[in-house]
Image (spheres, rainbow, N blue to C red):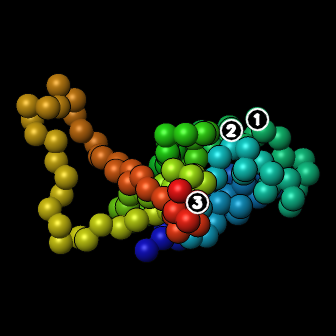
Amino acid sequence: MSSPPLVDRLRARNWRLTAQRRVIAEVMEGEHVHLSAEEVLQRARQRLREVSLATVYNTLNELVAMGEVKPVDAGSGATRYDPNTGASHHHLVCLGCNQLLDVYLDPSATAIELPPSERHGFRILGEEILFRGWCPSCSDQV
């Protein structure tokens, strides 16, 4: 249920893919990828030493503004970035190891909607659900 690879989506948009931007986009490919900026930097530098933390942050900010990456606040630690923007999904996070996974709700289930009385004048653009629990490895230690 994941989106096409980020690099392919960026090429389709004719976004200028410098060597640094390409490597940053490439390290964000795969299932259940939710990397922090620092993790993106570490992985990108394994492929291209010239990548800087400033370039990672600038690129991630541009990708978020374009809607190609979503920031995910899992409640502890650094913000992580999700390149899976094509399929509607939510997240599951382990309270022990902070593993973060994409989860898909049954599409036949009724949509979550905030009643007008609870919107406080906001124009709602979407919602995000974060399920919290213990992964199998951490459950054994609790």
From the viewer's side, name the closer residue of 141 and 28: 141
Confirm or deny contact between disc 1 and disc 2 (CB under 8 A).
yes
Residue at the image point whose x is 51% and y is 50% from the top: 95
Residue beneath disc 2: 57
Quadrant position of residue 57: top right
Give the Cα separation between the discs numbered 1 and 2.
5 Å
Confirm or deny contact between disc 3 and disc 1 (CB under 8 A).
no
Residue beneath disc 1: 54
Bin the neighbour count of mark 1 within 10 Å (Cα to Cα): few under 14, some 14-19, many 20 and up: few
**Element type where label 2 sits in the image:** helix
Residue at the image point whose x is 63% and y is 66% from the top: 29
Mark 3 or mark 1: name the one nearer the start of the chain.
1
Specify the label residue 44 is tagged with. Answer: none
Residue at the image point whose x is 52% and y is 62% from the top: 139
Quadrant position of residue 118: top left
Confirm whether residue 14 shows in the render.
Answer: no
Residue 63 image position (x, y, % from top left):
57, 47
Kind of residue indicated by mark 1: Ala
Give the Cα separation between the discs numbered 2 and 3.
35 Å
From the viewer's side, name the closer residue of 66 and 43: 43
Q: Is residue 51 above or below residue 9?
A: above
From the viewer's side, name the closer residue of 117 and 63: 117
Residue beneath disc 3: 141
Viewer-side label of 3, 1: 3
**Element type where label 1 sits in the image:** helix
Kind of residue indicated by mark 3: Gln
**Element type where label 3 sits in the image:** loop
Residue 81 image position (x, y, % from top left):
57, 49
Residue 72 image position (x, y, % from top left):
50, 46
